[in-house]
Image: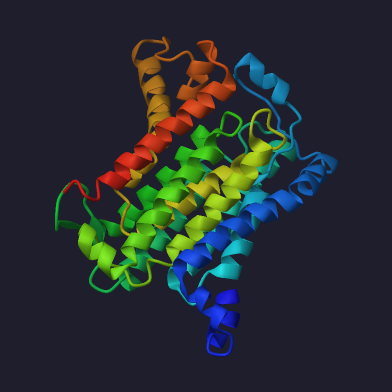
Amino acid sequence: MLYWLLYPLKDIFGPFRLFGYITFRSAYAAVAAILIVLVFGNRFIAFLEEKSIKQQIRGVVPESHKAKQGTPSMGGLMILGSIIIASLLFCDLTNPNIIILLTTTVWFGILGFFDDYIKIYKNKSRGLSIKTKLFFQILYGMALGLYLYFYGPEGYATKTNLIFFKNYIINLAILYPLFVTFVVVGSSNGVNFSDGLDGLAIGLIGIAALAYSALAYAAGHVGISQYLNIIFLAQGGEVTVFCASILGASLGFLWFNSHPAQVFMGDTGALSLGAIVGTAAILIKQEILLIIVGGVFVIEVVSVMLQIIYFRCTGGKRLFKMAPLHHHFELSGLREPKIVVRFWILAIIFMMIALSTLKIR
């Protein structure tokens, strides 16, 4: 919005030229998102408490988690609201990538909202059924995949970058919509699995958003993309601004979500944030790199899969004390904050490895 309103006036007032720079708008999108959460955070948490929108601890969880019963939930509304407002203020709203990212935010935000609503008000521990959530996730993934198949970047609609190989691009052709669906669904659920400790998931999302801010800027810059031998996308650079707003919102929410958490994001935040990062990866053709950038999310999901497989193959024995993996370390005696910080450190290492692959070709 500010880009629309102020940048055209650059010849009248010179400083408005700054709004033409992606780096400037990205920085202020991040700042705006942080401030929105910090300014309205306490009032929003008080609203959640007033409406009894609180965490319900059900099922098998570590004993320490029972103390979290009654903590305000659905804080994802605060995260998504700040992302949307910051993006509307600082993104170029004529860019189709921004429209797609906003659509993803709203679609998965609504899906997560209904999931949380059912858990809290209908007293159903699992919220929406797995089949229902997967249906709407797959539906959106296929719709996005088909849209990009027909209207994606000219010459690169069904192509993606391949890591470690110079000047080699994969063309997925007719399989591209399925590939997009897999990325969106996988990233959405990966974050959801990781949202089990105070500050864990939102910290990991912030790190991933930082990585994709850098990757999007590189993809949208002619010189940098040629130097790194990655696909140049003229409209890809604008994704940087959106990812910066995610980073800002994550840092702002972490203020309230750090141990001991004053509020939880709920599925409203977890399902949507994962899908947004996955969509950003798709739009800048760095989907495969998401495996490394989101390495901790991958580990968490794999730990659940291994637990299920091992349990069934051994007639009831467990590979881990509890899955996802962060609960295993909890039951092994590590305190919650230490696990969270160590997972953040691991995520930063994965991020640096991912960025370094751009030159390991």
Q: Residue at x 60, y 17 (%)?
A: 62
Quadrant of residue 251 within the rendered picture: top right
Q: Is residue 173 above or below residue 333?
A: below
Q: Is residue 199 left or right of residue 263?
A: left
Q: Residue at x 57, y 46 (%)?
A: 250
- Seen from the viewer's position, the closer of residues 35 and 107 is 35
Is residue 300 at least partly visible in the picture? yes
Q: Residue at x 70, y 49 (%)?
A: 38
Q: Quadrant of the N terminus?
A: bottom right
Quadrant of residue 157 within the rendered picture: bottom left
Picture coordinates of residue 85 (x, y %)? 63, 63
Q: Residue at x 55, y 40 (%)?
A: 202
Q: Is residue 116 left or right of residue 205?
A: right
Q: Is residue 284 above or below residue 152?
A: above
Picture coordinates of residue 34 (x, y %)? 63, 52
The colour scheme of the drawn protein is rainbow
